[in-house]
Image: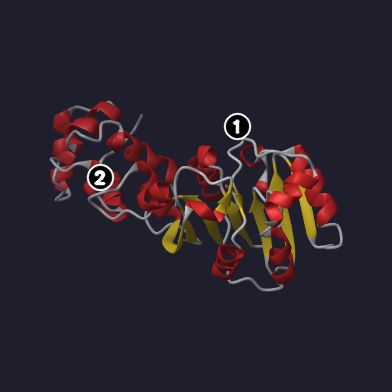
Amino acid sequence: MRIKALLEKYNLRPSKGLGQNFLYDEGIARKVIAAADLTPADHVIEVGPGLGILTRPLAEQAGRVVAIELDRCLVEILRETLDPLSNIEIVEGDVLRTDLVELVPPGVPYKVIANLPYYITSAAIRHFLEAPRRPQLLVIMVQREVAERILAAPGEMSLLSVGVQFYGQPRLVERVSRGAFYPSPQVDSAVLRIDVYDHPPVWGDNPARFFQVVRAGFSQRRKQLRNSLSAGLGLSAQEITNALRAHNLDEKLRPQTLSIEDWGKICDAIPISR
């Protein structure tokens, strides 16, 4: 196993604190890269390159790869083992504190490839989707349960699925067994591709307003919309009821049943001056 040999060579152990589970299945790595539809014109940001199982083949297909790695020891290994490839830049740092605008030349579109540590998955996805310059697409490895939440349809929606589906169209690329990693995590994973909209089709001019309403709706997800929106937005239940009924919306629905388009209609219905 190449990953284990590299760890032994450099006298390293995977860090539980950093959520390090290194992908070593080259077949899965090929599927991740294929899902990104790379060309020599593409700029790629890779998050969590680890020991570089994806980084080298990414550089062979894309024009430029910027790999962001938090672990300083891994950064040193990557710079040594990938040194012959001139189109790779290794950046030491926390992706959540990295200014994405500085990583890609102005006006240049980019794609994101990431094997995300479980503990930063939601935050990292938001970091990219809410960035001033969003990527064209993301191909991400996430915990299978998280993938299912992101892909959820009305009836099983959550704040996470709304947050992703507002900005783009997610689809399942591949289910990944925990045995594809070293050390093996306690859960299985999945590869998702998220095609990011040039402009969100619902309330794209005012995402802050959209998510103000959505967060209020999910603040008490077991309650009916009338009650959760009233509590979350500081309006009376009657004001909410009147606004929703005026737009032919059922105030008794629960937030997990609503589509992105439904949330857009609710934003249209409820005036927020606060």
Q: Is residue 131 above or below residue 200?
A: above
Residue 104 horizontal side relative to residue 229, left or right: right
Quarter of the picture holding the N terminus: bottom right
Q: Position of residue 127 (x, y in %)?
A: 55, 44
The image quadrant of residue 61 is bottom right
Image position of 198 with respect to 267: above or below:
below
Kind of residue sitting beneath label 1: Gly
Answer left or right for 255 relative to 72: left
- Marks 2 and 1: which is nearer the front? 1
**What is the count of numbered marks?**
2
Amino acid at pointer 2: Gln
Q: Position of residue 112 (x, y in %)?
A: 60, 57
- The reply to whether callout 2 and callout 1 are in contact (CB within 8 Å) is no
Q: Is residue 228 left or right of residue 32?
A: left
Which residue is rendered at x = 25% and y = 45% of the image? 256
For the point 86% across and 62% down, the residue is 84
Name the residue nearer the viewer: 243 or 15.
15
Residue drawn 64% across the image and 62% down it: 109
Q: Secondary structure at mark 1?
A: loop
Q: Which numbered circle lies on residue 17?
A: 1
Circle 2 packing at 10 Å, graded few (<14), some (14-19), many (20+), is many
The circle on residue 202 is: none
Q: Which residue is mark 2?
A: 256
| Mark positioned earlier in the residue sequence (2 or 1) | 1
